[in-house]
Image (cartoon, rainbow, N blue to C red):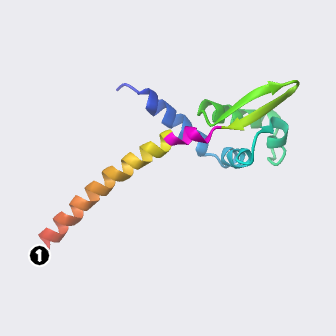
Amino acid sequence: MLVSHMDNNLDHLFTALSDPTRRAVIAQLGAGEAPVKDLAQPHEMALPSFLKHLAQLERAGLVTSRKVGRTRICTLHPEALQTAQSWLDQQRAAWKGKLGRLEAYLEKDTR
């Protein structure tokens, strides 16, 4: 079975969103760009562990970072969530149709 690029992106997105620390970082960056040091401060973990969380967010395309002098600044890219939203919308539509047909069948069968 071939894994498509979209499936790979979805895997990275849902992996990134599956962790409360990473979701908190997304919320922090919702207020604007921030240095890694400031993002890491509220989380009770060593910086190398926190950097692994940032790497997951970058792999998913949700966050980018750039170096300004000796400081690494992170930026949120919420448009990356559109891939997940599109997939969820497709799944919702498919299941809504299937459940609607099942409901019609069951109503017909009970008459």
Which image quadrant for residue 79? top right
Please tell me whether the stretch drawn in magenta is mainly helix, strand or loop. helix
Residue that carries the numbered disc 1 in the rendered image: 111
Question: Residue at position x 55%, y 42% from top?
Answer: 81
Question: Residue at position x 49%, y 42% from top?
Answer: 84
Query: Residue 88: x and y, percent?
Result: 43, 47
Query: Residue 105: x and y, percent?
Result: 17, 64
The question of residue 6 being in magenta is answered with no
- Residue projecting furthest to the right: 70
The question of residue 81 being in magenta is answered with yes
Quarter of the image where the N terminus is located: top left
Q: Is residue 105 left or right of residue 63?
A: left
Which image quadrant for residue 60? top right
- Residue bounds of the magenta highlight: 77-82
| Residue 93 appears in view | yes
Q: Is residue 59 left or right of residue 98?
A: right
Amino acid carrying mark 1 in the image: Arg
Looking at the image, residue 10 lies above or below residue 2:
below
Q: Nearer the viewer, residue 80 or 39?
A: 80
Looking at the image, residue 29 lies above or below residue 60:
below
Looking at the image, residue 105 lies above or below residue 7:
below
Quarter of the image where the C terminus is located: bottom left
Q: Nearer the viewer, residue 8 or 32?
A: 32
Instruction: Count the labels in the image.
Output: 1
Q: Is residue 30 left or right of residue 39?
A: left
